Amino acid sequence: MTFNINHQFGIAASWHALDEKLTLVSASSEFCELAKIYENPPQFLTFFEAAGQADLLRAVRAVPKGEALTLDLPMKLNRTKQWFRLRGIVKMREAAEPLLQLTYTPIEDLIQRERELDRNVKEMTELAEWLMAEYPGNVYISDQDNYELLYVNPIACDTLQAARSQVTGKPCYAVIQGLDKPCSFCTNSFLKEHESYEWNFENQKLKRAFKIKDRPIRWQNRRCRIELSYDMYSSEYKLAKKDREREVILNTIPVGMARLDACDLSTVLWYNEKFLEMIGYTETQFESELHCQCNYIHPDDMARLQEISGNLKTTGENAVFDKRIRKRDGEERILTTTLGYVSAQDSWDGIASYYSIGLDVTDERRQIETLQHKAEKDALTSIYNRAETESQISSYIAENPQSMGALFMIDTDDFKQINDTQGHMVGDVVLTELAMAMKKNYAVQRCCGPDWRR
């Protein structure tokens, strides 16, 4: 096939034969400049690593004709690796073989921000592991399907008189009970999603009695059971209700923490320094101006918080959600919040409470929204760019094959003359005003209906 350069397309795009190499048939001048192709282009798949080649070929084979595909992949261009969002569609042609059309949008900044968010999630996971390590009783996590023991905390290692490396990877019934097959009293069949199962058990191997609480969880992307247990006759068990909360509270962690009175879900009983930093108050200001009330939470989110907290009393599980807060200077921030409930019976001081852990994700969320906007919208007019428009039209047609519709193409007469005689800055103003007028007209029609001019 003869390779052609398309100087009219306007964005980075390429066209390919539907063969095993996705042979490059044509490309826009923008793509040629991006890939430094001027003649005799290399094999197209050499722009991708082996895994990326497989992913792209798999996606092309799976997408039906006329339906769009979207894929984020790194490409090797000019000896550097850059991330792009590839959008493709198979173009049917009369009396000729169909071609795959691909367009390219750079998303390197978006990928970097997603990696930062992944690191934040990892930090939260590490925090959860730290909390389990600080738990004053035994913690076991095992696979529900093959009974493999995946995690034990330091207290459990002391109970079993074994190092973690000696017990993880082995069947839980062998390690904890000394059996050669699954326990006849295994609680797997009693477990329900978002519920705990409590029971007492006399362990014949350890010669000790335990109070146990089990529940199903996802761990390492596996279906697992977490088991919390106390030796019913140990001094640790008698002090556990007091020590469990005190040990967590007294240790400093790099997130905002607060303890709310469960009676009114408003009074803040305790907080750490990071909490004050997040809401922008000093200790004196918080006590004198807010009177230790959680009025820093956005009013629109309070009803949802009350609903979530009410559910925790019955389920006993923790909840993770986003909420907005208003700092003392009026700035609005977004926190990813983990909320847990401790009953009065389990509380060391007899006060039913909610413990809240907050992580500020405002900047990350705003930057991702900005990067997503840049990937899909024209920077000047904030209207969807050509690639995104084609993608949405293709998706709509593929999802609604029997529907009827109309597509209007609006041309600006003599626009080149404006640029030539008035300058490109005036041309940009004209384009911006046209876009604003069309969006305003569309908004009015949606609000008032087709007879809005009357």
Image (tube, rainbow, N blue to C red):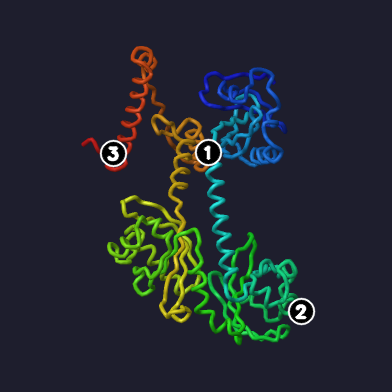
Q: Is residue 31 above or below residue 160?
A: above
In the image, residue 170 above or below residue 81 = below
The amino acid type of the residue labelled 1 equals Asp
Residue 238: x and y, percent?
A: 55, 84
Contact, CB < 8 Å: mark 2 with mark 1?
no
What mark, if any, has residue 444 been given in the picture?
3
- For disc 1, the marked residue is 109
Q: Is residue 212 visible?
A: yes
Amino acid type at mark 2 = Leu
Dot 1 falls on a residue whose secondary structure is helix
Residue in the picture at 57% in, 80% down: 198
The alpha-carbon separation of the residues under discs 3 and 2 comes to 73 Å
Q: Residues within 10 Å of mark 1 (few under 14, many from 20)?
A: some
Residue plotted at (35% across, 12% down): 421
Q: State the SS at label 3.
A: helix
- The disc label shown at residue 339, or none: none
Q: Position of residue 150 (x, y in %)?
A: 68, 66
The residue tagged 2 is: 179
Residue lying at the far right in this picture: please name it.
180
Percent from the top left, x then y, of residue 264?
34, 72
